[in-house]
Amino acid sequence: MRLLYGVVGEGMGHATRSRVVIDHLLSRGHEVRVLVSGRAFRFLTDAFRGRAGIEVREIAGLVMAYRGNTMAPWASVRANLKGALGKVRRNLDAVAALAEEGFEPRAVISDYDSWTYLYGRSRRIPVVAIDNIQALRRLRHPREISAGLRTDFAVARIATGLRLAGAWHYLVPSFFFPPVARPRTTLVPPILRDAILAARREPREHVLVYQTSTANDALVPLLRRLPGEFRVYGMGREGREGNVALRAFSETGFVEDLRTARAVLAGGGFSLMSEAVHLRVPMLSVPVVHQAEQVMNGRWLRRLGYGDCAESFTEEAVAGFLADLPAREKALAAYEPRDNAFTFACVDELLGRIERGERKPKRLVGNGSRTGA
């Protein structure tokens, strides 16, 4: 079956998740054409280099600008307007090339990518959405998740609803399972890379810190004032400053430090958070300000007792979190880690239904439950 797969390039979580799904599709004999933007293009190109049945092509994607730990809306707008016409033309050319080359996909899979979604909708090709951001709109959350940030959440829900409106079905990876609020939606466990599925928890004494902003000059001095060892990724430099080890990124080294960490300090991104939950490592989340999806993730982490959520990294927040690790570990002990089997079964079922010309399913078997994986 010929498939078009779109991957948004903002953040690497979409790319790492898509690599897992695409690998499964290739193992099932599908022919996959991938359109992807940003850093994700190089990542997926390297991941599937020399693999039969797949071609990865680059398109231009949206970018987000940040000031410290706050998303800067107007700076983001300016960054995206710069060269916008050229980017649009480039993407239109990439999409048009599919038809010119005779590649006629039977279905489109989109991980929050708009261009492949629009291609599918304009040609009445079924679009399957696979992304965690749809949790904002397609799940029914308790009030505490959006408390105090109703405007941010309302805007995010509208934007998410417009992004992939009217998809054939939505698969929403999640480590939290509130009721599903909309039809054609199935909750699935987090989609995890093989390195995480193979990892075994062996807690030691260090704390893993993942920081996506190299401009956070206050972080290392803050950690040095706290007791214990901290292993920091994402600062763009290597070395040791007292009890803080600054590490260059290595997938093997990162997974090793994650599975053996006594705790994690990071932002509100879904991928690392879901990996920490899977491995039962307590996590303190500091979501990007005004990023409703990250706030949602962090507040669910706190609600379930798997970790905590703070507005910023402070000595009080970090010390208080680390002092309460036994309670977090007790809550995490009740979490049932799951592999990708249920998600793959859902993908296979959806593609099979599309191939047979069946109607859109409202829900797949096992939706949102702890069974079926």
Image (spheres, helix red, strand yellow):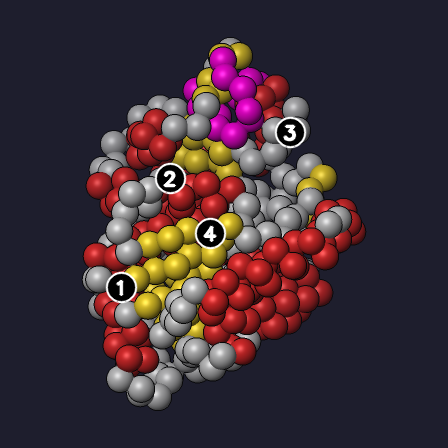
Identify the residue under disc 2: 46
Look at the image and tell me whether residue 178 can be seen.
Answer: no
Query: Which segment did they paint magenta?
Result: 224-239
Identify the residue under disc 4: 57
Look at the image and tell me whether residue 186 can be seen.
Answer: yes
Structural crowding at the residue carrying mark 2, measured as other residues with C-alpha within 10 Å and reported as few (<14), some (14–19) or many (≥20): few
Q: Amino acid at mark 4?
A: Arg
Where is residue 154, by image quadrant?
A: bottom right
Where disc 1 sits, the SS reads loop
Q: Earlier in the sequence, mark 4 or mark 3?
A: 4
What kind of secondary structure does the magenta stretch mostly adopt?
loop
Residue 30: image tag: 1
Identify the residue under disc 3: 216
Whole-number angstrom distance, CA of label 3 to CA of label 2: 30 Å
Tell which tag, 3 or 2, sits nearer the viewer. 2
Where is residue 335, by image quadrant?
A: bottom left
In the rendered structure, does residue 232 fall within the stretch colored magenta?
Answer: yes
